[in-house]
Amino acid sequence: MRRSVLVFLLITVVILTFLLHEVSTLIALLLEDASADAIQKSELPAPNSTLLSTRPQLIPKIIHQTYINETIPPQWLPAQQACLDLHQDYEYILWTDAKSLEFIEKEYPWFAPTFRGYQHPIQRADSIRYFVLATYGGVYIDLDDGCKRRLDPLLSYNAFLRRTVPTGISNDVMGAIPQHPFFLRVIESLQGANRKWVLPYITIMASTGPLFLSVIWKKWMGEHADLEDTAGTAEEWKGRVRVLMPDEYSGHTWSFFNEFKGNSWHGKDAKLIFWMGKNWLLLTAAGTVIVLSLGLAMWWIYGRILLLGQKRRGYVAVGSNGSPSLVPTRGTSRSPRNSPRKGPSSLWKRLGMEGKKERYELVEQHDA
Ligand SMILES: *[C@@H]1O[C@H](CO)[C@@H](O)[C@H](O)[C@H]1NC(C)=O
Ligand SMILES: *[C@@H]1O[C@H](CO)[C@@H](O)[C@H](O)[C@H]1NC(C)=O
């Protein structure tokens, strides 16, 4: 086998292994139902239950939200007000763009260049929530998620995320104790994930958004599978991330949130971004198919080039008197006088042209 083919095969194997490795997390995500960490219905007291006060409180009573500035658009006001009204004993922090930048520059200067450099404002809105949860703890709530009941029962976990349908998790509602190891891991991963993809929406999803968070969450569980076994025991692993399931998120009398899905978030692409957020898995699958097709197309083109190269190389430079001349491998159109008389058999053999060699010899004999 030619060395170029070997190199190509090697590179292909490396790339495929890399792709499979990347895709395997996505496939694993697809299959992940979060049942091991789901917050069970039976764990949660009913909204007005007297059992509420018997639960420990780990997550501090802080609600974080983000917006461009202090002027919340009218369509979000009822949702925001519902959260404020239900949690008057909670601290409330609205992270405006200016406040977020100031916070990052003061507390996480190593991240400030990345934070400032994000091309899309929503990447800053995404990433700031991970940093404030890792720093202060509390519950982050998107402005379009109105509160329907008090969050208290959720404060008894070390951390929780929200499950999305059909798969993965979202970053629109999250809670954690300060310095929770999962959120520390998330903020450490942001710089590595800060890559540009062809489409801005994929860039947002994969660099700071739900896809980014889902991938880290899946890896986190894989890496700590042994610790997950301590679930429910006295020395339960602190890094465990519980998962708020769809029924507890919205749609029922016992759910925590009302969705006020409107249309104005950060900028005019909001609708599309929301749509992509809901359909990120579909988009990821489509992206994978495109990448694989491109790979196959490249393979095919490379094959063509190799074939062409072989055909060209069929004309080899040989000459009886030492001067190079072209000998055609096909047909006998050229004068046999130009063909080698002595010792070319090894060359013929190498080129696998035994049959043609015989033909030449016949012509030579005839000539002589
Ligand atoms: C809980 O109590 C409040 C105030 O008493 C009431 O408005 C609300 O409807 C109750 N929620 C449920 C689910 O019963
Ligand atoms: C807040 O941002 C919105 C949207 O960019 C803008 O229309 C509004 O004027 C801003 N408000 C203040 C007080 O700067």
Image (tube, rainbow, N blue to C red):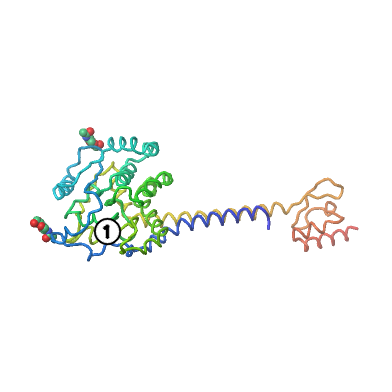
Q: Secondary structure at mark 1?
A: strand
Residue at the right extreme?
368
The image quadrant where one finds the C terminus is bottom right
Expressed as whole percent of the image width and height from the top left, the position of residue 359 reads: 81, 62
The quarter of the image holding the N terminus is: bottom right
Residue plotted at (25% across, 64% down): 40
Question: Horizontally, is 127 left or right of 361 in the view?
Answer: left
Location of residue 185 in the rendering, given as x and y in whole percent from the top left corner: 38, 49
**Residue 202: image location, x then y, percent:** 38, 49
Which residue in the structure is indicated by mark 1? 244
8, above or below 231, in the image: above
Image point (34%, 35%), residue name = 105
Residue 258: quadrant of the picture: bottom left
Foreground of the two, 27 or 132: 132
> Up-down: is 243 above or below 66?
below
Q: Nearer the viewer, residue 147 or 349?
A: 147
> Which image quadrant for residue 288?
bottom left
In the visual, does 136 lie left or right of 299? Answer: left
| Rendered residue at 23%/64% (across/down) | 43
Residue in front for this viewpoint, 293 or 339 = 293
State ligand 1's quadrant: bottom left
What crowding class fits label 1: few (fewer than 14 Cα within 10 Å), some (14-19), or many (20 or more)?
Answer: many
Asked whether, in this view, residue 66 is left or right of residue 302, the answer is left
Q: What is the three-letter code of the residue carrying label 1?
A: Leu
The residue positioned farthest toward the bottom in the image shown: 42
Residue 82: image location, x then y, percent: 15, 49
- Residue at the (78%, 55%) spot, across then down: 333
